Image (spheres, grey):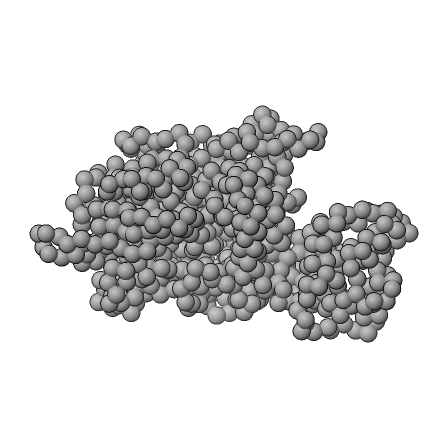
Amino acid sequence: MAFQKAVKGTALIGGGAIATVFGLSQFSQYRNKHGTFVRVQAAEAVTVPIRKHFPTREEQILALQTTGEFDVLVIGGGATGCGCALDAVTRGLKTALLERDDFSSGTSSRSTKLIHGGVRYLQKAIMKLDFEQYKMVKEALEERANLLEIAPHLSAPLPIMLPVYKWWQLPYYWFGIKLYDLVAGSQCLKSSYVLSKSRALELFPMLRKDELVGAIVYYDGQHNDARMNLAIALTAARYGAATANYAEVLRLLKTTDPASGKERVCGVRCRDVLTGQEFDVKAKCVINATGPFTDSVRKMDDQEVPNICQPSAGVHIVMPGYYSPDNMGLLDPATSDGRVIFFLPWEKMTIAGTTDSPTDVTSHPIPTEEDINFILNEVRNYLSVDVEVRRGDVLAAWSGIRPLVTDPNSKDTQSISRNHVVTISDSGLVTIAGGKWTTYRAMAQDTIDAAVQAHDLRAGSSKTIGLQLQGAEDWSPTLYIRLVQDYGLESEVAQHLASTYGDKAFEVAKIAQVTGKRWPIVGKRLVSEFPYIEAEVVYGVKEYARTAVDMISRRTRLAFLNVQAAEEALPRIVDIMGKELNWSEQKKKEELEAAKKFLYYEMGYKVKSDQLTDSSEISLVPSDIERYKKRFHMFDKDKKGFITILDVQRVLESISVQIAENTLHEILNEVDLNKNGQVELNEFLQLMSAIQKGHVSGSRLAVLMKTAEENLRQRVVIPVDRSGGGL
């Protein structure tokens, strides 16, 4: 009864205000250039022919070297840079793109995976009567609808729950969320709604019950960010853009304008990172779309130019899927320090984040233990006491750098803009900075519009609204069924391929290896608990993957889902890539080490090892210490004080259990702190102490030794797969 009264009161309180904002929304059709959202294929308006297949990287490098002059040269292969290349090439401009690392290797692959307008930005717009913030939200919601349409295989609407723990918050949040729907207008994904306490707990059973009043559910979009970025790059390549990853810009080329006598940017000197070869690429217009590295390229043009980028680090963590429902996210609108935390299902795992703190610009941002624990503490505040939020359940963690900017054209140069900024230097360098993932297309359109005007390029208007991306054309929600029926793939693998490659999934299925089993017929997995298959590595090389890091982090998302699984898959990935790219044994070894270093520092493996170090405290009661010593000595029959792989094999043989030797090496290596090939008693006690405190979970050695102890006489099979525990 009280709940119903609150909802009725909510309607009365918010009704008049919504009517007022509705008038504002109607008045503010500020982006008329977008027009009405036309539900037809934009490809019909594109006169540039599209290739059936994208060129090889070698062909792209050759095009960069041999083309006399491009109309547009984009520096940066993130979402915005690739968006600029696609916008330019579909207007008929001769287009090139250079990326010094891999496509989406920076911020664009390290997002919250949401396609959204920004609920918190709308709140600030209303509270501060900030029309610019309102315009940004309006634009983002329009772009959200477009992105969900042009890449339906990579994106989908996601319901997000906002739990309410105080009665007065119900009308407040209801009004804000309804306003969000209203601003979206005809592009509203689904209407938001209010839930009673019982219904909220039914949909999100992990939620904290104490003092829960009810909840509000609204809809935003979610996507696979790195694959989306790659789809934009591949689509641009198919339309004729000369795009190349691992092509580093060394300096800008300039020429003197005979009419004005001023220096003008006319191209770049670049280096193929893979071969070391240097060459010039000439262009009428050069665009700087380098995200956090915006200022470094601007200083290539003018050393005296002031910095405009204000980098901010955002850390995310990934936890097992059982922490959240399969199809319901959670929004914490007011954390302990005023930030916003999302708690979302993603790729059958749970992603939580993000933080927001000043940072230095670096190509290799590292998540900190402080940020990880901040996120975990906020998650604990919203989950039931029955759910033990353990530090050891963090499977992966990463940091991304947001390229917030101050507008150099603004009078108040100290104010940070959440919107994007397009600037043109005296020498003609076009810079696009700021903005957000969701608005990449609008940012690209504004950038190319500015470039066309500033450099007198002959081009029409943007053609990218509704322009389908790589894999979208013949995709359907039931496409995976054909993959199962036609090729004999596992249903889970088929669903994964369809949602990753769209209608190009058939190209991956065609090269999938026969398993030799009754079922599945084809599709050898890289690791048992994830649906990634070996054929994706072969196909990933065709998609311009050139390092093992490219494969584990951006062609597949293993590194972002479970760093231990990624490390386990690395040897096979390196072998397959080595065969495709003719790597020497030395090169394969270097790739393996580089990928392990990436996992260790950038994906949170380091913070895992920091939980269990030589200085780790053993906080076990005497009875537990004695119990664990007995278990250890069951393996250490000779009282050496340590156990080796031979000791483990001997015990397993006594109970008729066989485990591959390389698997046993992996299991012991997880606990072997000083890497001397043996696990000492002290190391084992540190492990058991860390497990009790929740700092470590899913240790295969602990599970193996416990199961062996319990079943020496029963002779049962000992499971050695990861149990879902992580960092």
Is 496 in front, or is 294?
294
How far across and down, in percent of the image, does residue 67 sit? 27, 40
Q: Quarter holding the C terminus?
A: bottom right
Q: What's the residue at 70%, 74% (across, down)?
A: 617
Please determine whether, in this image, residue 382 is positioned above or below residue 159. Answer: below
Viewer can see residue 386:
no
Is 684 in front, or is 487?
684
Q: Quarter holding the N terminus?
A: bottom right
Farthest-out residue, right = 713
Please determine whether, in this image, residue 151 is positioned above or below residue 387. Answer: above
Viewer can see residue 402:
yes
For residue 677, side relative to residue 206 (left or right): right
How far across and down, in percent of the image, does residue 175 sit? 42, 56
How far across and down, in percent of the image, does residue 352 sit? 54, 57
Is 168 in front, or is 422?
422
The picture quadrant where one finds residue 415 is: bottom left
For residue 23, side relative to residue 337 (left or right): left
Please determine whether, in this image, residue 562 is positioned above or below residue 190. Answer: below
How far across and down, in percent of the image, does residue 536 sit? 54, 39
Q: What's the residue at 51%, 50% (across, down)?
A: 549
Q: What's the residue at 73%, 73% (across, down)?
A: 619
Is 483 in front, or is 164?
483
